Image (cartoon, rainbow, N blue to C red):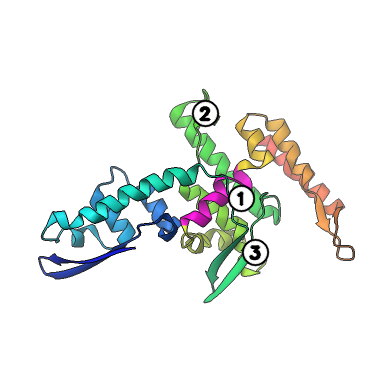
Amino acid sequence: MIEKTLKATHGRLRICIPSQLNEVTLGQMIALQEKPDMSDLDAISILSGLPVQQLQTIVNANDLMDFADAVLGLSHQIKNLYQTDGIPKTISMETDNKTVKVKVVNNLSVEPAGAFMAARDIIADEIAEHINIYGEENWKDYFNPSLNACCKVLAYYFYCRVTGKVYDEYAAAAFTETIKKLRVTEALPNVGAGAILKSTLVKELNAGNYINAANQFLVWNKITDPKTGKKVISKTLSLRREKERALFLTE
């Protein structure tokens, strides 16, 4: 972290911003991405939590140069992060005033089904918006989901695992506020390298193979046998997947 106390027109102002990517939260990254025509002051404001109006009261603008250099350094680190294929084995989150550590799996599949369906819709909306703006030609070579979409996907993915509660779509959606507190080095690899964005279903959707994508619903029809601890086919889940596949093909 870079921390300085600078002279302002009405006293002194303490500023503290991250200098390393593992100090940046996903929420800060989302705010940076969504800010149009962002200036250095905007970036420093987002990373420090101080309003731009307060930063504008700094007497000597040169005093902010170290912070501007830190922002530039972070931008280079972010580029490298997007190119990584590493996924953390575990991730820790704060919930109900306690720290919960959960395992991270490579495949965001179907536990629970509601989370998968909600995440699928988020990605489908992102793809549709991308095509609407940039056109269909070679879109899958250039498509990247927004950080806000990544945050929502992770909220659906982690809600039950972290809270231990039964899946609830509205509660899972609200869980984004917890996800935003994740360090970006924990959050982005989960979305960029594994989970739903590289699952077979989304690969098929990206390629336009909607029949094959629909067929992927049928794959997730297993439960864990409490007696043997092994995965076995569930008739109930199989019927549900058939209905989900049919619904998907009618949309």
The earlier-in-sequence mark between 1 and 2 is 1
Q: Please say if the residues under marks 1 and 2 sit with CB atoms less than 8 Å apart.
A: no
Label 2 packing within 10 angstroms: few (<14), some (14-19), many (20+): some
Q: Which residue is mark 2?
A: 139
Q: Is residue 1 left or right of residue 147?
A: left
SS assignment at label 3: helix
Magenta region, residue range? 184-197
Mark 1: amino acid: Ala
**Mark number displayed over residue 162:** none
Q: Which residue is mark 1?
A: 118
| Residue at image point 28% right, 56% down | 44
| Residue at image point 48% right, 34% down | 130
The alpha-carbon separation of the residues under discs 1 and 3 comes to: 16 Å
Q: Which residue is mark 3?
A: 161
Q: Number of marks in the image? A: 3
Quadrant of the frame with the C terminus: top right
- Residue 6 drawn at (x, y percent): 17, 65
The alpha-carbon separation of the residues under discs 1 and 2 comes to: 23 Å
- Residue 52 drawn at (x, y percent): 23, 57
SS assignment at label 1: helix
Where, by quadrant of the figure, is residue 91 drawn? Answer: bottom right
13 in magenta: no
Q: Nearer the viewer, mark 1 or mark 2?
A: 2
Q: Is residue 60 left or right of residue 220?
A: left
Quadrant of the frame with the N terminus: bottom left
